[in-house]
Amino acid sequence: MVTTVDRIPTSDLAAQHAPLQRALEDAVARVLASNRFILGEEVAAFEREMTAALGIGHAIGVSSGTDALLALLMAAGVGPGDEVVTTPYSFFATVEAIVRLGARPVFADVDPDTLNLDPDLAAVRIGPRTRAVVVVHLYGRMARTASLASVCAAKEIPLIEDAAQAIGAFGASRSGVNRAGLLGAGAALSFFPSKNLGGFGDGGMVITGDERVAAQVRLLRNHGAAGKLRHTVVGGNFRLDEMQAGLLRVKLPALETWSAERRRIAARYRERLADLPIRLPPWDDGCVWNQFVVGIPGDRRTALIQHLDQRAIASSIYYPIPLHLQPALAHLGHGPGDFPQAETAARETLALPIFPELGDERLARVAGAVADFFQ
Ligand SMILES: *Cc1c(COP(=O)(O)O)cnc(C)c1O
């Protein structure tokens, strides 16, 4: 007799939404009844609730994390001929927003420990054409930016944060605690369903402490319209829907509990996997663990993925191709060897299941299966 075990997925939105079902349905009914679907009370209320939850001055709901980045770069005045210093190891959207504006991404390699942009390597790539710096807080861990932020401030270069995976993350600095969105010009958040605050479709947000950036992004998201059909700048349609905002308002109050559970799972994985010949992500109090990513040296990653798959455990590779080697960016003229740490990460990293509903039993199954592989 064969007993089938439940497959362990990389996320379980059905389980996350089940206890909220009634409240979600109420939100949908409320928006339907309002007959107001664009930039109404739901978006305004969600923005207010986000500023309170994240302790930040301004929150502007937009259509996606990608458009949040685009709006921040547009607000910084990035355009043709400009350079933007950024990481070669992220989701494609980070660099796509730069290239769409006609600017040239200038990469600096990542820190092999955190897989975030190395701030010292980034600082030396800043030159006379640099119009902005984009750091990514990858997997929920804030990039170290203290030194980079002061270089940017001295040169009046906007520091933009891609915090799509890092809502609510914080980092330590000399001056105390930093939070995503407060380091420089502003941060981009995403509500793509796999993010820590996942929506019901696409959505994103710009958060910033800078009133001028906030005002500019508000203009840009709505075709640059300062009044009714009077357009003062060229923007786009980067608006968040009322329906999306209404639904996200239901999930927002649970975010802190979910982040705490992600932290607890990460800590347990780190204990259970401590003696294996793999690279563990370093501990970090302020990380919100959108992913738990380990490094599998020695060409054994594919075999481990298969081993886990045979035991009904899902895993994912984020990201298999570093940005400088993406075919769409061939015009930049990069080749293998240009950013060795990013290339090693692309070759060796593997994301294990981490989501608030995972639970200890499934966690033990994942950790046990990984340990078995190295027996
Ligand atoms: C998800 C993500 C984005 C894009 O967000 P969307 O809402 O999907 O447009 C950008 N950068 C990073 C690092 C991401 O993980």
Image (cartoon, rainbow, N blue to C red):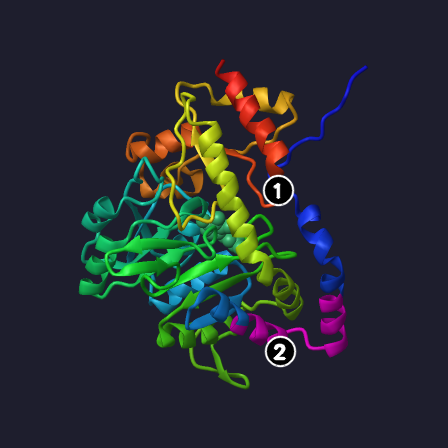
Q: Residues within 10 Å of mark 1 (few under 14, many from 20)?
A: some
Q: Which residue type does callout 2 highlight? A: Glu
Identify which residue is drawn at 33% across, 59% down: 177
Q: Secondary structure at mark 1?
A: loop
Kindly report which numbered mark, 2 or 1, lies closer to the viewer in this rendering: 1
Q: In the rendered view, would you say 20 is above or below 2? A: below
Magenta segment range?
A: 26-48
Q: Is residue 287 magenta?
A: no
Q: Read off the residue under disc 1.
A: 11
Identify which residue is drawn at 78% across, 17% down: 2
Q: Residue lying farthest right?
A: 1
Majority secondary structure of magenta residues: helix
Foreground of the two, 240 or 262: 262
Residue 199 lies left or right of residue 278; in this view the side is right
Q: Which residue type does callout 1 highlight? A: Ser
Q: Read off the residue under disc 2.
A: 41
Q: Is residue 28 magenta?
A: yes
Foreground of the two, 348 or 328: 348
Identify which residue is drawn at 64% across, 70% down: 242
- Ligand 1 within 8 angstroms of badge 1 C-beta: no
Residue 372 percent across, percent down from the top left: 54, 17
Q: Is residue 134 visible?
A: yes
Residue 316 percent across, percent down from the top left: 54, 34
Residue 316 lies left or right of residue 138; in this view the side is right
